[in-house]
Amino acid sequence: MQTQSHTTTDRHGYSLRFSPFEANHMLLATSQLYGLAGGGSLFLLAQNTTKDAQLSVNEQSLTELCRLEWSDGLFDVAWCPYAADIAATASGDGSLQIWSGLDVESAVTEQTPKQPLICLQEHKNEIYSLDWGEKWNYHTLLSASWDCTLKLWDCNRQNSITTFVGHNDLIYCAKYSPLIANLFASVSTDGHLNLWNSLDFTGKPLMSIEAHASEALSCDWSHFDRNVLVTGGSDGLIRGWDLRKMRTHIFELYSGEFAVRRLACSPHSATVLASANYDFTTRIWDLALGESAQEINAQHTEFVCGLDWNPQRAHELADCGWDSVVNVYTPQCLA
């Protein structure tokens, strides 16, 4: 398995996202001191291919195009769906930042602004999850915080549109449905999966179910079946849910003793998903082939926190962790 890697010294990886516009570009959100103290850095990375004349092979590597600094740790990042050089980050100080100039031309000429275009500050604690709506919600940002609330923002306004209240503990993840307008899901350390309507300004959930007996840390939606989403918990379980029958999960996968920190459903295959785990592994699952992981990649020496599929390259995956390493590769089971 050919892997492209990059190390961000003294910065520990929390989240990464491939660009929806440039197949070779990605953003990496990091924090100092494992996010417990200190600042954060946002890296724009690019995949490069160079020719080794002696070996007659192409060598691939990750290159840092630019780096932006924030005064607190950065825990999540999301590209703007309609502007190739704009993205948002979520911070430990309870604020969101919208950055510009995240493109090659600006980076090479050192024209990328060092300060964000706008800073959105309302949350009272860390923001651990950020999603920028697509299609129906392309102008809105969704933030999930350790203050037990979610907020919906118009990226052109300083104040939030709605505050959503329905969890009793820290919220780790919130995701828009890619196939159903105005629907989003969230999970919390209260163990619950909540479903919400972004147009319901009362801020109350449509539905709340106990997804895990322990902390629920991650969720994601299928890109193929509008009714299916998955959750991951500190119990090491990944559970699948169907909106048409939410009384119990439709499948369950066991990834080991440690927590499932992040999930990513493949945009290229209806049955494939990846999980980032606190046992230092990234696991690849194919529901069509059974309930065991098809591949376990142990390329990290610390918690794996970030995970994303490249939407423009079939089965290309990236992960990052507290060991300051980011990897890009195609899992062998999908090659």
Image (cartoon, rainbow, N blue to C red):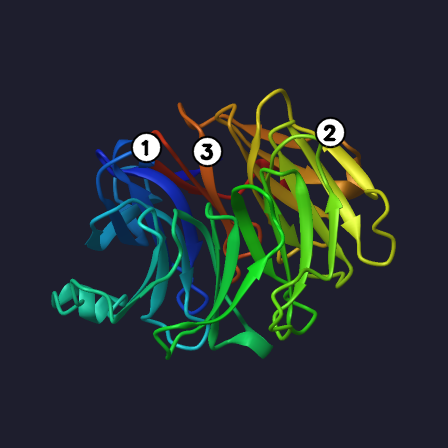
Image spot of residue 41 (x, y percent):
25, 48
Camera-side residue of 204 and 275? 204
Helix, strand or loop status at disc 2 = loop
Tag 3–tag 2 contact (CB < 8 Å): no
Q: How crowded is mark 1: few (under 14 residues within 10 Å), some or many (20 or more)?
A: some
**Quarter of the image holding residue 184?**
bottom right
Q: Is 32 above or below relative to 60?
A: above
Camera-side residue of 108 and 181? 181
Tag 1–tag 3 contact (CB < 8 Å): no
Relative horizontal placement of residue 330, taking residue 105 as reference (left or right):
right
Q: Is 318 above or below relative to 79?
A: above
The numbered dot on residue 289 is none
The numbered dot on residue 292 is 2
- Mark 2 vs 1, N-terminal side: 1
Helix, strand or loop status at disc 3 = strand
What is the three-letter code of the residue carrying label 3?
Answer: Val
Residue farthest along the top direction in this orientation: 257
What is the three-letter code of the residue carrying label 2?
Answer: Ser
Residue on which disc 1 sits: 34
Residue on which disc 3 sits: 304
Relative horizontal placement of residue 29, taking residue 276 as reference (left or right):
left
* Marks 1 and 3, how far apart at CA: 12 Å
Identify the residue shown where x is 58% and y is 43%.
218
Q: Which of marks 1 and 3 is in front?
A: 1
Helix, strand or loop status at disc 1 = helix
Identify the residue shown where x is 63% and y is 66%.
178
What is the three-letter code of the residue carrying label 1?
Answer: Tyr
Q: How crowded is mark 3: few (under 14 residues within 10 Å), some or many (20 or more)?
A: many
